[in-house]
Amino acid sequence: MTVRRTGLLGAFARIPTFEAVQYREFRLIWLGWGGTGLALWMDQVSRGWLIYQLTDSALQLGLVRLIQAAPFLLMSPIAGALADRYDRKKQMLWAQALDGSQYLLLAALIFTGHIAPWHLYATAAASAAVQAFQQPARQSLLSESVPAGNLTNAIGLTSIAWNVSRSLGPALAGALIAAWNTGAAFLGQAMLLGLATVWVLQLRGAPRSDDRTPHPRRSSFLAANMDALRFIGGSEPVRTGMLVLMLASLFAMPFVTLLPVFARDILAAGPTGQGFLLSAMGIGALTSAVLIASFGDRLPRGRLMLLGAAVYGVTLVGLAFTTWFLVFAGLMVVAGLCNVACNALIQTIVQANTPSELRGRIMAVYQQNQVLLTLGGMLAGVLATAWGAERAVGSMGLLCVVGTLAIFALIPRARAIR
């Protein structure tokens, strides 16, 4: 680990919220995380805008998102095993370079007038596939870049970077599209990935711990992933964290899929109101990330993880019965708080209780929540069609509450997880 710094950087790192910044490897990972986060959030706007511009089809907007979920399901087991078997830094480099290349390709196709909808589908799948390889490697390196006592602070700081990116990325993409066209936005995304790759190149790489478990190179990919699943089944903290993640990803987080319905048909707030509501959720998310980074490992992770999931569900029930815009906006702030509390604390629990030699595969399982988010969004749409958006969101929130209370009652030691 890097020794503590003096001077301006040292003073910055002495602020409890930014304590992990004193470690060089973490700083590089953190900066790279911010760059890739900006590119990903820009892609939410630029790819959606372009596909709608080319097709005038809302259905194809949804299909693009569905296509992006499939590679996480198919590629994550391979990505996790590779992250444990080979060099995690190289895996990140190759994944980021390929991701940046497909953004460059899209920019070139747009500027030359050869862009077609199938290009967006193909690159959406390719981008999701390489992102599936990025995340297990990056998250494994993250936990090895700081001492164990700084892990919660480090993950809180990555949540800050992610939520700042969520605020800035769409605005930056929109500005580039308005000033030039979507080609400029994709070019900007490629440049951000290039910058993130430069930071990853500077990583020294963390040494692996010497353990007594069979090295993953000696077993097949299937056997390696079965080892990871057996570990999750045998580790109560990891298993509990994964269960809470499944609940939140399937029943709570996908409610934003129906936000346009609430903004237009129930609150009569229009697109401007929808943007305000998303900003309110972003404020809550950023506040939660700052609090988690500031208090770090002093937090009772297990209790807060369960509380965050339960309050998330209760908040959705409240949203279902709210017709006042300002009350709805206030509840969106609470939803943002709970969203980050669930994600950041669960990730900390999982990483802190996973040995280094298994971390890539375990984090590959963790990132399968992207598939659950897509399924949850589809479930929300089906229920909204049958029952209406209010009952759909309220029912899913209630399921999240019931599931969390069941975990609280049936796994009492979950409350004591640190």
Image: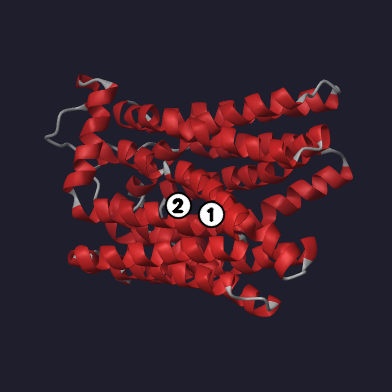
Whole-number angstrom distance, CA of label 1 to CA of label 2: 7 Å
Instruction: Give the image quarter of residue 311.
Output: bottom left
The residue under the point 75% across, 63% down is: 264
> Please, what is the three-letter code of the amino acid marked with disc 1?
Pro
Q: Secondary structure at mark 2?
A: helix
Residue 3 visible in the displayed image: no
Nearest to the observer: residue 131 or residue 383: 383
Nearest to the observer: residue 314 or residue 81: 314
Disc 1 and disc 2 in contact, CB within 8 angstroms: yes
**Residue 321 percent across, percent down from the top left:** 58, 75
Relative to 55, residue 21 above or below: below
Instruction: Give the image quarter of residue 54.
Output: top right
Instruction: Give the image quarter of residue 193.
Output: top right
Asked which colour scheme the image uses, the reply is: secondary structure
The residue under the point 24% across, 22% down is: 217
Q: In the rendered structure, find residue 250 and report the number of the disc placed on it.
A: 2
Q: Secondary structure at mark 1?
A: helix
Classify mark 1: residues with Cα within 10 Å, few (<14), some (14-19) or many (20+).
many
| Residue that protrudes farthest toward the front in the picture | 386
Relative to 67, residue 288 above or below: below
Relative to 370, residue 320 above or below: below
Q: In the rendered structure, find residue 254 and report the number of the disc placed on it.
A: 1
Q: In the rendered structure, find residue 375 and report the number of the disc placed on it.
A: none
**Residue 206 percent across, percent down from the top left:** 33, 39
Residue 49 visible in the displayed image: yes
The residue under the point 58% across, 28% down is: 125
Q: Is residue 25 left or right of residue 387?
A: left
**Residue 290 percent across, percent down from the top left:** 49, 68
Classify mark 2: residues with Cα within 10 Å, few (<14), some (14-19) or many (20+).
many
Tell me the quarter of the image containing the C terminus. Answer: bottom left
> Please, what is the three-letter code of the amino acid marked with disc 2?
Leu
**Residue 68 percent across, percent down from the top left:** 57, 35
